[in-house]
Amino acid sequence: MPAPRNRELLVRVARMYYEENLSQQEVAERLGLSRTNVSRILTSAREQGIVDIRIRDLSLRDIALEDEIKSAFALAECRVVGGRGHDATLSQVGSAGAEWLLDTLRPEHRLSLSWGRTLQALVEAVRTDRVIPVEVLPLVGGLSSVASEITGEELVRELAARLGATSQRLHAPALLESAASKETLLAEPAIASVLDAARRSSLSFVGIGAFGAGSSAAIIDTLRLTPRQRQQFERARPVGDVCARYFDEDGQPILGAVHDRVLAVSLEDLHAIPTVVGMAVGVEKARGVLGALRAGFMNVLICDSALGRALLGMVRQE
């Protein structure tokens, strides 16, 4: 039997990691320990029965639907999960993304992220005792002006902490007052170098927005377009966005005032990244996800079953 003091430390570390959802690095910093020691303590807690991990398959993966979507859109991989209620489904899609990430990620990878609630669910579901020495990068600048959303910078920092990885920060907003302001920032080596590194990612995770809803609508509102700019933008018939880059139903990028004031990688840049994983939840995202799939930069899709069925239904109706 372990000494009471040792057992108390095991329990304390286990509670911080498993119940308070702190990363191993955060636990180490709070207790004045090394990350290696925290990992060993968690292993001891499991071996001594202090932590009892039970695995229940709550993912409700729809394998048949996954196969249909892979075939319909020529994807390399697809994960489709069910759920009851938006929050439950968001959590399950995030967990499916985290599982796929941990199964796929290798030390030689350079990992990059966009932003949004689905990617936040992904990051919150990442839990591993392994140190995975990768570099995590942002695909888009900070979006602090969109108050309801967590920024990509926060997600990059948190995911790196959970993986024991390094990260780079993009010290610039995503949405600028003018095209000239964006070009000025892009001329700064500290900003340009981070975006260049993101373009050389080997694995990227992106959230997919639907035009007119949620964060996609908030981005347009934040830009405060002139009536003429708004009319020109809407005339192009946007259906969704990735990294605040909007596209039409055929996946073609929409250029103009919105595009010129966003600091992020382009849709063309995403085409050059070997593996791009798109994540989305909800049937309201169907047109946006379909447009993103037609754009051709995604080769992995992780979504909920209702959205997956909606995608196939739209294709069959054409």
Image: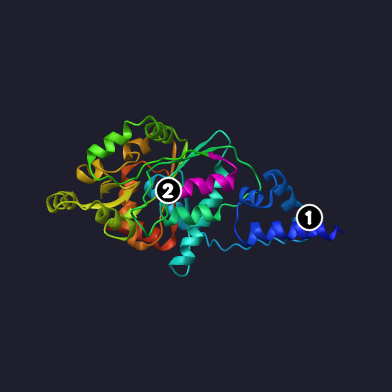
Q: In x, y percent, where is residue 19?
A: 63, 62
Type of the residue with mark 1: Glu
Q: Are marks 1 and 2 in contact (CB under 8 Å)?
A: no
219 magenta-colored: no
Q: Give the residue drawn at x 80%, y 59%.
A: 7
The quarter of the displayed image where residue 133 is located: top right
Q: Going by the picture, which residue comes out furthest to the right?
A: 1
The C terminus is located in which quarter?
bottom left
The N terminus is located in which quarter?
bottom right
Q: In x, y percent, where is residue 3?
A: 86, 58
Type of the residue with mark 2: Gly
Q: Which residues are magenta?
A: 154-166
Instruction: Name the residue carrying label 2.
Output: 152
Q: In x, y percent, where is residue 47?
A: 78, 55
Q: Give the residue drawn at x 54%, y 51%.
A: 98
Q: In x, y percent, where is residue 125?
A: 55, 55
Instruction: Name the residue carrying label 1.
Output: 47
